[in-house]
């Protein structure tokens, strides 16, 4: 049940609102280490710091920790630190007394009070206004804070979980984050791996997201083919699970696997530019060269396939490589096995296809037969 909006992103959670454990943690070694840390964090009343790239599931993990803790029956209150202007954040977090400023006609509790005997989740803590870092430090030290305009402190019991996609040690060096606050929130740190570091969990994530959005949108979403799953596992996923979620949403709505290939292709459209190679550090020449060659090969293969109406045997001859080599390179580059439907319809008439098909060797594989027909 959600509280009113005026009370600020406060919820009483239930297990049904979270994905199953096997989806959250998967089976990768990286996430197994996370699971062990989470189990320890859930029962200990100490601040927890979740670090990881954007889209890796830090909020899901914060909710999981809350529900598994002794304070799971209390409120889970989220504060998105960069989303609220600094001038308003103090009153949102700590509340204010009647008459504290113009327009304060009544007293209002802040989100810290709403999280009493529950969990306060501070998302993107690195972007917290420096002026508020001192008040948060006091809260973590003795559980006390004061509303704006109040003459005395208030006492709360609250579990604080923080999340960030930045390296706080670097923020300390630049002077944007207090070192003493870092030591307070860094009692137990959990580092979430990127999706690229847990690609073995991708099929489980895909199945969960397919079922979730098929039910949400009232659509039928067929399971993805093995080849499409392999294409997803070869993608780098800079946006992590959030990006995967958006790709699956589009597939559920449109209903064709080619939308997934189109999504991956559009994300890979970024041109390789030698000017972007850093010269002030270590340059991995082999890796840079491999990336450049892969991008060039992909463009050449796509252009050749288009020129030959996606007849892969003709394209292989034009490229002076074997048919098997072309299929391999297409898989490596994430090129779909078939052209989009608008191109496939421009092939030979159906009657001619059937006549040609009857003259082909019986033992020929389905893909090779299709290329011969085209």
Image (cartoon, helix red, strand yellow):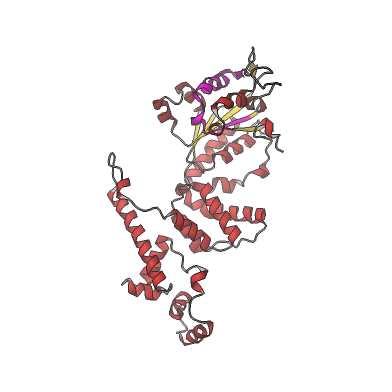
The image shows residue 106 at horizontal and vertical percentages of 71, 21
Residue 228 magenta-highlighted: no
Query: Where residue 228 sits: x, y (%)?
Result: 50, 61
Which residue corresponds to the image point at 64% horizontal and 25% vertical from the top-left?
110
Which segment did they paint magenta? 119-146
> Looking at the picture, does residue 114 appear above or below residue 279?
above
Q: Nearer the viewer, residue 26 or 367?
A: 367
Which quadrant: the N terminus?
Answer: top right
Question: Would residue 36 appear left or right of 170 to someone viewing this image?
Answer: right
Q: Is residue 23 above or below residue 174?
A: below
| Residue 12, x across and y down, in percent | 69, 35
Q: Is residue 138 magenta?
A: yes
Q: Quadrant location of residue 88?
A: top right
**Which corner quadrant holds the C terminus?**
bottom left
Residue 229 visible somewhere in the drawing = no
Residue 293 versus residue 68 in the image, above or below: below
């Amino acid at each position: 049940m959600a509280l009113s909006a005026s009370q600020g992103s406060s919820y009483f959670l239930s297990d049904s609102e979270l994905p199953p454990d096997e989806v959250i943690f998967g089976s990768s070694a990286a996430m197994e280490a996370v699971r062990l840390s989470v189990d320890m964090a859930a029962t200990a009343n100490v601040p927890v710091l979740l670090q990881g790239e954007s889209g890796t599931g830090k909020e899901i993990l914060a909710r999981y920790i809350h529900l598994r803790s002794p304070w799971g029956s209390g409120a889970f209150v989220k504060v998105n630190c960069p989303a609220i202007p600094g001038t308003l954040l103090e009153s949102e977090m700590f509340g204010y007394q009647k008459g504290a400023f113009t327009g304060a006609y009544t007293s209002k509790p802040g989100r810290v009070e709403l999280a009493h005997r529950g969990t306060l989740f501070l998302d993107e803590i690195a972007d917290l206004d420096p002026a508020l870092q001192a008040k948060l430090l006091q809260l973590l030290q003795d559980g006390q804070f004061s509303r704006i305009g109040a003459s005395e402190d208030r006492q709360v019991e609250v579990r604080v979980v923080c999340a960030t996609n930045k390296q706080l040690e670097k923020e300390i060096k630049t002077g944007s984050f207090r070192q003493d606050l870092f030591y307070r929130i860094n009692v137990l740190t959990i580092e979430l791996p990127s999706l690229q570091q847990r690609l073995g969990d991708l099929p489980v994530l895909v199945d969960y997201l397919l079922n979730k959005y098929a039910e949400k949108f009232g659509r039928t979403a067929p399971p993805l083919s093995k080849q499409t799953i392999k294409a997803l596992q070869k993608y780098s996923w800079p946006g992590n699970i959030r990006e995967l979620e958006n790709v699956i949403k589009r597939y559920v709505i449109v209903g064709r696997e080619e939308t997934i290939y189109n999504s991956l292709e559009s994300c890979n459209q970024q041109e390789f530019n030698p000017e972007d190679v850093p010269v002030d550090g270590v340059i991995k020449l082999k890796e840079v060269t491999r990336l450049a060659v892969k991008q060039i090969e992909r463009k050449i293969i796509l252009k050749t396939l288009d020129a030959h109406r996606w007849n892969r045997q003709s394209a292989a001859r034009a490229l002076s490589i074997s048919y098997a080599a072309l299929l391999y390179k297409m898989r490596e580059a994430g090129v779909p096995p078939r052209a989009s439907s608008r191109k496939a319809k421009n092939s030979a008439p159906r009657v001619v296809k059937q006549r040609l098909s009857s003259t082909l060797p019986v033992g020929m594989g389905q893909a090779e037969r299709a290329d011969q027909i085209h």
